Amino acid sequence: MTLKQAAQTALDVQNACNASGVIRSLHEITTEVLWPEAQRLNLGTRWVNSHPIIAMYLFKIGELNGCGISSLDSGYEKAERECMELANAA
């Protein structure tokens, strides 16, 4: 999976209803896409933790859990916009 595909998956997962499936997908993207990209760019944990793809997943997991995190959060729009830019990159 490419970074572009991972960004699109993060956008698509916003329609999910199964937290365990979302978490499995997050693990796959983190392991197979974000960490290799961080290593390639010589970046670390902070870059991975604050990546908009991670943010989109965390918003969805929070929404499914009912803990008060949702797409109404102010950070959601920024993460969504950044994922859309990545997903639509050439």
Image: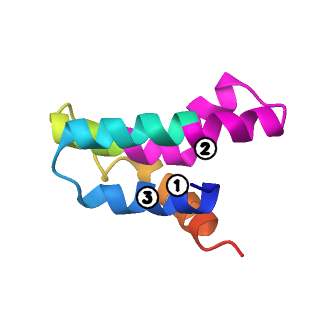
Is the residue marked by circle 1 packed among few (<14), some (14-19), or many (20+) residues within 10 Å? many
Q: Residue at x 72, y 76 (%)?
A: 90
**Reading the chain from its start, which is encountered first: label 3 or label 2?**
3
x, y (%) of residue 60? 30, 45
Tell me whether the residue at label 1 lies in contact with that at label 2, contact meaning CB atoms closer than 8 angstroms: yes
Determine the image quadrant of residue 59: top left
Determine the image quadrant of residue 9: bottom left
Residue 46 is a magenta residue: yes
Q: Which residues are magenta?
A: 32-58
Q: Residue at x 22, y 42 (%)?
A: 63
Q: Residue at x 57, y 67 (%)?
A: 87
x, y (%) of residue 89? 68, 71
**Relative vertical location of residue 40 with respect to residue 82 in this rendering, above or below:** above
Left-right relation of 90 to 61? right
Left-right relation of 46 to 1? right
**Relative vertical location of residue 87 with respect to residue 62 in this rendering, above or below:** below
Which amino acid type is marked by label 2?
Answer: Val
Measured Cα–Cα span from mark 1 to mark 3:
5 Å
**Reading the chain from its start, which is encountered first: label 1 or label 2?**
1
Is the residue marked by circle 3 packed among few (<14), some (14-19), or many (20+) residues within 10 Å? many
Read off the residue under disc 3: 9
**Image quarter of the N terminus:** bottom right
Read off the residue under disc 2: 33
Q: Is residue 30 visible?
A: yes
- Say which element carries label 2: helix
Numbered tag placed on residue 6 in the rendering = 1
